[in-house]
Image (tube, rainbow, N blue to C red):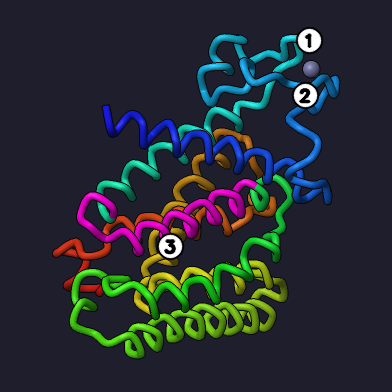
């Protein structure tokens, strides 16, 4: 029962993430006006705005114009709900309240960034940049920010570990950008990826940066090859790397402290 409530609260935040994903790239306020159908502009009332459930009850169509509602809406709500529950079990249930709050905001930020990058190929500064000082602050404030060894670390050590992640993320992308320009004569990664990896580094440290790239590259390659073979994409189509990095970061975050991974990668 408690699990279901946590999932539901997470799904509501997923609803909010959907609003950000739709409105932020269009330079619209995320507060006013209330929800409306992007196709017919009709206001959406609360009973049609219940996460996941409303989408199912409406059969994936707007009540007024009957046009399809993007499946992105329930998908983001489900993903946010599930991740909130996983974070809750890993951090909150173990008594790491401070850690839970910081990593929850981090995850929500990653979801919004991924959604916007997926649709517009842009990483929004207004979300990604504040995550960097937020990660540094979390390392300073939360005793177990880098589970499990960090319990014995002092705040300043944690802060520098977080800072090492910011610098590793930024310099690594800078390095790859320069290599890409020399070898392939085109951008392999962009400025958005640089800011995103710096933010990931602030929360996960330098090892987390490498792990996120490791997971992200595998996933990106597998999905790209699958899309090319199913003829949904061509070899030279642009693929945003941000969402894959974000998934890599979420995996790295959830498996922090995992014995097998800690042997190789993560403190
Ligand atoms: Zn409509």
Q: Position of residue 193 (x, y in %)?
A: 61, 68
Main SS of residues in magenta: helix
* Label 1 residue near ligand 1, CB within 8 Å: yes
| Residue 155: image tag | none
- Which SS class for mark 1? loop
Circle 3 Cα neighbour tier, 10 Å, few/some/many (<14 / 14–19 / ≥20): many
Residue 68 screen position, x and y as percent: 71, 17
- Where are the magenta residues, as a range? 92-115
- The reply to whether the magenta stretch includes residue 198 is no
* Residue in view at x 79 percent, y 47 percent: 29
Is the residue indicated by label 3 positioned so its CB lies within 8 Å of ligand 1?
Answer: no
Residue at image point 35% right, 55% down? 251
In the displayed structure, 173 sits above or below 123; it is: below
Is the CB–ligand 1 distance for label 2 below 8 Å? Answer: yes
Mark 2 in CB contact with mark 1 (< 8 angstroms): yes
Seen in the image, is 236 located left or right of residue 161?
A: right
Circle 3 residue? 102
Q: Quadrant holding ligand 1?
A: top right
Q: Who comes first in sequence, dot 2 or dot 1?
A: 2
Can residue 252 be seen here? The reply is no
Q: Is residue 257 above or below residue 56?
A: below
Q: Which mark is residue 37?
A: 2
Which residue position holds label 1? Answer: 64
């Amino acid at each position: 029962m408690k699990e279901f409530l946590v999932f539901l609260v997470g799904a509501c935040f997923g609803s909010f993430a959907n609003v950000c994903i739709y409105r932020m790239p269009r330079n619209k306020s995320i507060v006013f006006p209330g929800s409306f159908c992007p196709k017919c502009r009709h206001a959406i009332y609360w009973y049609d705005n219940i996460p996941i459930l409303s989408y199912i009850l409406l059969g994936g169509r707007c009540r007024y114009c009957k046009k399809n509602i993007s499946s992105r809406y329930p998908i983001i709500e489900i993903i946010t709900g599930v991740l909130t529950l996983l974070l809750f079990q890993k951090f909150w249930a173990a008594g790491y309240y401070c850690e839970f709050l910081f990593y929850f905001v981090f995850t929500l930020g990653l979801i919004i960034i991924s959604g916007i990058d997926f649709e517009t190929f842009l990483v929004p500064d207004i979300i990604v940049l504040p995550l960097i000082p937020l990660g540094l602050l979390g390392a300073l404030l939360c005793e177990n920010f880098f589970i499990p060894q960090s319990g014995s670390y002092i705040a300043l050590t944690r802060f520098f570990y977080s800072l090492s992640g910011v610098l590793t993320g930024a310099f690594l992308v800078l390095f790859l950008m320069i290599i890409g320009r020399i070898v392939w004569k085109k951008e392999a990664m962009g400025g958005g990826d640089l800011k995103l990896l710096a933010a990931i580094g602030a929360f996960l440290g330098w090892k987390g940066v490498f792990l996120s790239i490791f997971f992200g590259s595998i996933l990106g390659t597998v999905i790209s090859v699958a899309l090319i073979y199913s003829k949904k994409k061509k070899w030279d189509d642009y693929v945003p790397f941000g969402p894959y990095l974000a998934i890599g970061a979420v995996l790295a975050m959830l498996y922090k402290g995992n014995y097998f991974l800690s042997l190789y990668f993560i403190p």
